[in-house]
Image (cartoon, rainbow, N blue to C red):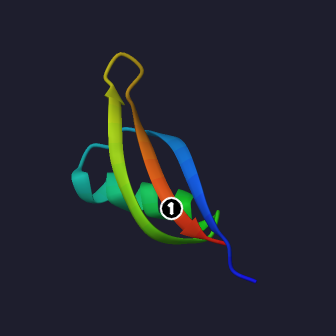
Amino acid sequence: MLVMQFLTVEVELQPTPKALQQLILAQLQAQGQPLRWAITAIAPDRSTATVEAVVMT
């Protein structure tokens, strides 16, 4: 049975947008199949980005 799940993850900022996208997808795929995701906040003082996503598990 497939279940949609809402996740919030925090990732380290990367030197390039492509590297950031790859890191986000890798972390989300560890939780399930990503359906959609968005960066919702950036904390420059901690060098992190908050990502909200919907995945199928």
* Residue 27 at x, y percent in the picture: 55, 57
**Where residue 47 sits in the image (x, y, percent)?**
38, 27
Q: Is residue 22 above or below residue 57?
A: above
Q: Quadrant of residue 35?
A: bottom left
Q: Residue at x 50, y 62 (%)?
A: 54
Q: Give how far across and how far down residue 37 sits, in percent.
A: 39, 58
Looking at this view, is 43 or 4 the one in front?
4
Residue at the farthest top position = 45
Quarter of the image containing the C terminus? bottom right
| Left or right: 21 in relation to 51 | left
Task: From the viewer's perspective, tell me whether residue 12 is left or right of residue 30.
Answer: left
Give the image quarter of residue 39: top left
| Front-lying residue, 23 or 33 | 33
23 vs 4: above or below: above
Q: Is residue 8 left or right of residue 21?
A: right
The quarter in which the N terminus is drawn is: bottom right
Residue type, numbered disc 1: Val
Total labels drawn: 1
Q: Which residue is mark 1?
A: 54
Is the residue 40 above or below the residue 33 in the image?
above
Percent x, y of residue 15: 27, 43
Q: Residue furthest bottom?
A: 1
SS of the residue under disc 1 = strand
Q: Residue placed at 31% from the left, 22% from the top?
A: 44
- The residue carrying pointer 1 sits among few (fewer than 14), some (14 to 19) or many (20 or more) residues within 10 Å by Cα, namely some
Instruction: Pick out the residue farthest to the right.
Output: 1
Q: Is residue 48 above or below residue 14?
A: above
